[in-house]
Image (spheres, rainbow, N blue to C red):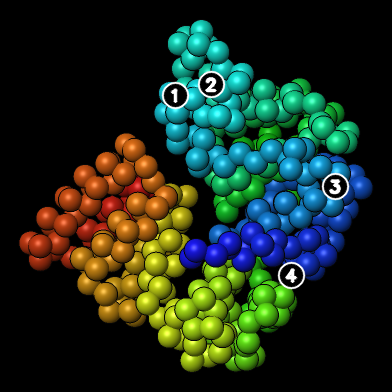
Amino acid sequence: MDEPLWIDEHAPSLADLPQASVRDRLRDAVDEPVNLVVYGPSGAGKTAAVRALAAAAHDDPETDLVEVNVADVFGMTKTEISEDPRFASFIDAKRRRNSSKADLVNHVLKETASYSPVSGGYNTILLDNAEAIREDFQQALRRVMERHHEATQFIIATRQPSKLIPPIHSRCFPVSVRAPTDNEVVDVLREIVAAEGVDYEPDGLEFVAGYAEGDLREAVLGAQTTAEQEGEVTMNAAYEALQDVGSDAAVESMLDDAEAGAFTDARSTLDDLLVDEGMSGGEVLDDLLEVARSRYSGDDVAELYALAGDVEFDLTRGTSDRVQLGRLLAELGR
């Protein structure tokens, strides 16, 4: 997409969040800032909800909300962490030279939490995709939360709250973000397409909502894709625009689950692609690599291609597509 993404252009306010229970719980957190564990499935709107909370709670959310994507930072090398513009200012040459990667990550957590708020009484730190935090880093995070609790609100967003250690849970209030219903998704899409001046029909919005299967982000991107390619959001337009990108969404979901260690869910999506969609193992592998190129870099991509080469070789020998691709997903989880 060449145009600005609608998910950014139409980021919801607290009042616009589709799930009433989330709206009510986060309104309480505006007046009484507490640490939160915000959990729910991919695409349910966890990050958007936290940003909406920050916008309501801070006069200057762009400075007093600090977002750390755990899957990104914890996947960096030592050199990448020390050279990242977000962290380079407080990682000097001596620390970079004498510290392990674990030490640098711990230092990043401490320094980020110690920043003085710009516009109010406290900062908000969002740790997104927190299921990727190793237990030893979670212990370090617990100590940082204890030390800086007066000036910093910690919000931990995750698809798998069971991955968090009990001391983290005990310091946070839980906020469950369920996947929005199709009707809730349609309401969100209707507001956006009306604001964009795009012609639509109700059954077109319903088609996009059904296509997204509870993934609000995917629904908004699907509506924008349809509008840009077809000029309107009707059922026929949505079908034409989205029929070729459905596998990419499924592969994204499959990779999310594999990375999070939810192998059963990842393999279920794999079965859908192989059986329901009738794709060959080679086609799934090609789509997987295409999606992976947009989300991995450096050594991660090289390692994935090495694994994919072994899988492709075994596929050409006539072995089970499900078994070989399942092996690749299991390796991604590890």
Quadrant location, the C terminus: top left
Q: Earlier in the sequence, mark 4 or mark 3?
A: 4
N-terminal of the pair, mark 3 or mark 1, is 3
Residue at the (50%, 63%) spot, across then down: 2
**Image spot of residue 20 (x, y percent):** 80, 68
Quarter holding residue 208: bottom right
User: Local crowd at mark 1 within 10 Å, few (<14), some, or many (≥20)?
Assistant: some
Give x and y (percent) for residue 280: 22, 72
The residue that mark 3 highlights is: 57
Question: Which corner quadrant of the image does residue 3 belong to?
Answer: bottom right
Between marks 2 and 1, how big is the CA–CA gap? 7 Å
Rounded to the nearest angstrom, the CA distance separating label 4 from label 3 is 19 Å
Q: Secondary structure at mark 2?
A: helix
7 relative to 173, above or below = below
Q: In 3D space, how far apart are the residues under numbered discs 4 and 2 (Cα atoms)?
A: 38 Å
In primary-sequence order, the first of circles 2 and 3 is: 3
**Amino acid type at image mark 3:** Ala
State whether residue 243 is above or below residue 85: below
User: What label sits on residue 18 in the rendered view?
Assistant: 4
| For marks 2 and 1 on the same chain, the one whose residue lies earlier in the sequence | 1
Q: Are marks 2 and 1 in contact (CB under 8 Å)?
A: yes
Nearer mark to the viewer, of 4 and 3: 3
